Image (spheres, coloured by chain):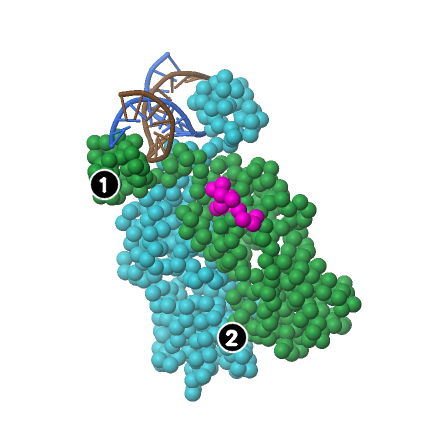
Chain colours: A green, B cyan, C blue, D brown
Amino acid sequence: MPVTIKDIAKRTGKSITTVSRALHGYQDVSPETRAMIVRVAEEMGYTPNLLAQRLQKQRTDTLGFILPTFGPRFSDPFFSEFLAGIGNTAGEYGYDLLVSTQPPGEKELEVYRQKVMGRQVDGFVVVRTRCQDPRIQYLRKVQTPFVAFGRTEGDLDYPFVDEDGVAGMKMLVRHLLSLGHQHIAYISPPLEFTFARDRMRGVREALAEANLTLAEDYLAFGDLTQRSGLAQAQKLLSLSKPPTAIIAGNDLMAFGAMSAVQQRGLRVGRDIAIAGFDDIPMAETAHPPLTTVHQPIYKIGRMITDMLIKIVRGEPLETQQVVLQPQLIIRQSCGE
Amino acid sequence: MPVTIKDIAKRTGKSITTVSRALHGYQDVSPETRAMIVRVAEEMGYTPNLLAQRLQKQRTDTLGFILPTFGPRFSDPFFSEFLAGIGNTAGEYGYDLLVSTQPPGEKELEVYRQKVMGRQVDGFVVVRTRCQDPRIQYLRKVQTPFVAFGRTEGDLDYPFVDEDGVAGMKMLVRHLLSLGHQHIAYISPPLEFTFARDRMRGVREALAEANLTLAEDYLAFGDLTQRSGLAQAQKLLSLSKPPTAIIAGNDLMAFGAMSAVQQRGLRVGRDIAIAGFDDIPMAETAHPPLTTVHQPIYKIGRMITDMLIKIVRGEPLETQQVVLQPQLIIRQSCGE
DNA sequence: TTGAAAGCGCTAACAA
DNA sequence: TTGTTAGCGCTTTCAA
C-alpha cells in the first residue's frame, strides 16, 4: 500500500494539515517540525497521490494530444519528431501528456469532447488543421485552451504556430524555374488541410510569376504517404508529355516519387527533378539527398507546448500567433 | 462550470446516491426515477468527472508508455506505427494512454518511478528492452503490471511479446547465402538491446552453418538511425575487400546503407545486396524495394495492450509470453 | 505554530 | 426503492 499523508501524520504525531504544509514548504511551520516531517516522509517513501491533488486543485496538469492516424499502418516520421517536441517540453514543465490515436472523422470530435467533459486535460495541442476544422470550432465553443499547429480558413482568433507554406513553395518553384524547368508537376496533399491549400497556392503563384500555369494533367493528389507518392508519380510519368520536375506536398510523398522515377530507370536529379516539403531527417540521407523546404518540426512542437502551458497557467503570451518563415534546402534531387 | 452529480440531484430532488446508481444502470432504482434522472442528466450535459471517479475507484484506467527518444530529431516510423497499435487498443477498451518522452539513461527510471508512485497509471508498455533492463527490474520490484516488447537476458518471469530475431536473421542470411554471397557484412544496433544480440546471433549461426564467420571488418555498429546506416556502410564499402552484401539490424539503417551504395554509383540489388529488419511501410516503396524480415508492429502493439489490460483487470492470460515467428520478405534489394 | 473541519466529485456499505 | 454516511487523498480556510 502506498504511503499517504495520513500515514505520515500518524507516525509523526502531527495533523495531516501540518504535514501537508510542511511538505509544501510553507513558512507557518516550525523549522523542527518541518525537518522532522520531511525526514519521515522520505523514510517512508512518500509521494503525493496526483489524482487526489488534482481533484482538489481542480487542475489536471495534463495536456491532450490527439494523434490523427490514417489507417492501421500509420507510419509517419513527422509525428515522432513532433511528439518528441511536445513530450519533452511538457515533461520539463511538469505536465503529463495524454495521447489518443484517432483517425479523422466522426468519432474524432467525440474523443475531444470526452477529454474535455471528463476534465482530463487542461488544454490541447491540435495538429494538421483543416480549413473548416470542427475540433477548433468545438474547443473555442467550450472555451478549452489549445494551440494549433496550422491555421484554418476564415476567422483566426486563436493561438497557433504555422509555417508560411505559400512562401515556402514559392521559393522551391522559383528554384526549379531557375534551373530551367518549365514542366513542373505537383502532387498535393488532400485539400481539406489548410497547409495543402497554402502550398498549392505557392506553387501556382510562383508559376504565374513566370507566366506559367499548373496544367491539369500535372496536378495529382496523394494522401501524404510514400505509397501514394509512388502511385501518383507513376501516373505523371506515364503521361505522353511527362513533367521534368515533380514537387510533392510533403517529403514522404517525394520519396515515393523518387522510387517511381528510379523504377523506370531514370535518374533523380539528372533526368528528372524531385522536391519535397518538411525536411524530415530522412531527406538528408536519401539518395539522392532531397531538395525540400525545411520545417523545424521539433522546435514547433516545443513552441506550441510552451504557449499552451502559458495559456493554461493564465500567464500572458507575448505573441499568440506565429508564422515561421521557411527555408529552402537545396540538395541533389533537383540537380545542381 | 461543469455539471456534477450533485446538480442533478438538486434538480431531480433525488439524492446523489440515487443519481449515481441510476446513471450506472443499477437495478435497485425504479424505472421511472431512472428514466427521469437519465433524461435530466442528458439535458444538463452531464459527464462524470473522471478524476473523482478514479480517486474513488482506486484505479486510473490509464496505461503508461514511455517513449525512448534518441536525440531531439527523433524520427522513427517504427514508433508511430507501434503507438497507433497501443493507442487504438487502449481507446477501444476505454483506457487512456499517458505518454512520456525520455532518452534512455539515468532520468528514465525516474519517470517510471514518478508515474508509479503518483499512482497515475495502472500499468506500462515497455519497449526496446535491454539485456539488463532497469525498467523491468524496477517494475517487478514494485509489482506494477507491465508487458514488454522484447526480452531481457536471464530470468524471464514476466509477460512479453517478441519476435524471434535469431530465426529471422537466419532466414535472411540463408537467403543471401543461397544467392551466392560469401562476403556478408552486418551493421548491428547497440548490443545493449536484447534484440540486437539475438539478431547478431542469428547472423553468426547462419554463417556458421555454411562454415563461414563474421569477419571483424565486416561487423559495424550503428544507432538505428538512417544516418548511422549511411556512415557505417560507407566505411564497409571503403574496405580494400568490400562485402558483396550488407545486412542492417533494422530497416532505417538499411535505407542509409542503400544511400551509401548509390552514392558510390553502385546499384543496390545488382552490384551489392542490402537487407534490413522490421519491414516498416517504407521498405516496400523504397527503391529498390527492400528485402527484410517482417515484424507485425501494429499487431504487436495491439497484442501487448490487450495483454496489459487483461492483467490490470485481473483477468487470466492464456499466454503470458509470446514469441512470434518471423517472415522473410524478399524484394529486390538483394537481387532476384 | 498548529489542528479541526470542509470540500473537490464520486462510489458503496449500510440502514431505512 | 431510496437516502444517510463515510471515505478515496489531498488542500485550504478558519479558529485556536
Give the x, y percent position of residue A317: 53, 47
Q: Nearer the viewer, residue B73 or B8?
A: B73
Image height check: is A121 above or below B156?
above
State the count of labels. 2
As drawn, C8 above or below B153: above
Q: Farthest residue in the right direction? A: A211
Residue found 52% across the figure and 19% down from its top: B12
Q: Residues within 10 Å of mark 1 (few under 14, many from 20)?
A: some
Residue B136 x, y percent position in the rendering: 32, 54
Q: Which residues are magenta?
A: A308-320
Q: Nearer the viewer, residue A146 or B113?
A: A146
Name the residue nearer the viewer: C5 or B22: C5
Q: Quadrant of residue C12?
A: top left
**Residue A317 is covered by the magenta coloring:** yes
The image shows residue A311 at horizontal and vertical percentages of 51, 44
User: Which amino acid type corresponds to the residue marked 1 in the rendered image?
Assistant: Ala
Per the image, the residue denoted by label 2 is B258
Residue A35: mark: 1
Which x, y percent locates residue A158? 60, 45
Specify the subunit that label 2 lies on: B
Helix, strand, or loop for circle 1?
helix
The chain that hosts pointer 1 is: A
Q: Are marks 1 and 2 in contact (CB under 8 Å)?
A: no
Pick the front one: B126 or A64: A64
User: Cα distance, mark 1 to mark 2?
Assistant: 62 Å
Task: Say left or right for A45 vs A99.
Answer: left
Question: Would you place residue A311 above or below residue A128 in this image?
Answer: above
